[in-house]
Amino acid sequence: MGIFPKFIYKVKTNEKLVALTFDDGPHPLFTTELLDLFKEKGIKATFFVTGSGIKKHQKIVIRMITEGHELGNHSYSHKNLIFKKKSTIRNEIKKTDVLLRGLGVKGDIHFRPPFGRILFVASSVLASLNKKVIMWNVPTKDFKENDPNVILKRIYKRIKPGSIMVLHDSGIERHGKKIDRKATINAVKVLIDELPKKGYKFRTVSELINN
Ligand SMILES: [Zn+2]
């Protein structure tokens, strides 16, 4: 066991397989809309949820599992883990795993760090927990975008076989400003029609890793 966990930004494949990943959920409105879209098109995605979100929206997480999506660990409280103690980090990760297992998640539970940031302490904790850290090679900055076309443009520019896209189905409420992911939803609506026309198929992160 190494000191560093395995970081995955993309996967090597000759097939046009890609993974849609969503952070920060579940959100009662936006996640549900996404799940409806995916159900209609038979698409599987990967949701990196927070432990506190699981507690608030258990039914949505159960729906994700039932409908074949992959669940990942996005920490418990979505704090920046950079300056935290080992025990705090371990607790953030383990508590969220326990909640996911309790709802029936089987197999590996991958980790995505809050804010995409990790340093040495968190690295060693993740390695000791045998976690893969799932990053991305297609950033979208959807959380600060109101125009779905800008999000789509960013995706089309970077997408290639084995790509991992990162989007957000919820967010952290700041200064009482309501979370709005309409742009993300509208971009996804177009994306799930357009990428298959270019020959791409959607896979969960674990399916992509094991392709
Ligand atoms: Zn996040």
Image (tube, rainbow, N blue to C red):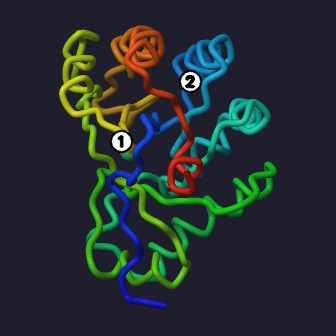
Locate residue 168: give its quadrant: top left
Give the residue type at disc 2. Thr
**Could one spot residue 22 in this view of the protein?**
no
Asked whether, in this view, residue 79 is left or right of residue 106, the answer is: left
Q: Position of residue 8 (x, y in %)?
A: 37, 60
- Give the vertical position of 155 relative to 97 (above or below): above
Asked whether, in this view, residue 160 is left or right of residue 111, the answer is: left
- Give the vertical position of 124 relative to 33 (above or below): below
Give the numbered dot on residue 143.
none
Which structural element holds mark 2?
A: helix
For the residues carrying marks 1 and 2, which lies nearer the camera in this image?
1
Q: Position of residue 9 (x, y in %)?
A: 32, 54
Q: Position of residue 146 (x, y in %)?
A: 24, 12
User: Gap between marks 1 and 2, in whole Å?
Assistant: 22 Å
The residue at which mark 2 appears reads as: 31
Q: Residues within 10 Å of mark 1 (few under 14, many from 20)?
A: many
Mark 1 or mark 2, which has the lower sequence index?
2
Q: Nearer the viewer, residue 173 or 180?
A: 180
Locate residue 33: give its quadrant: top right
**Could one spot residue 37 in this view of the protein?**
yes
Rendered residue at 18%/27% (across/down) = 157
Q: Residue furthest front?
A: 14
Is label 1 within 8 A of ligand 1 (CB to nearest ligand atom)? no
The residue at which mark 1 appears reads as: 163
Rendered residue at 67%/34% (across/down) = 57
Give the residue type at disc 1. Ser
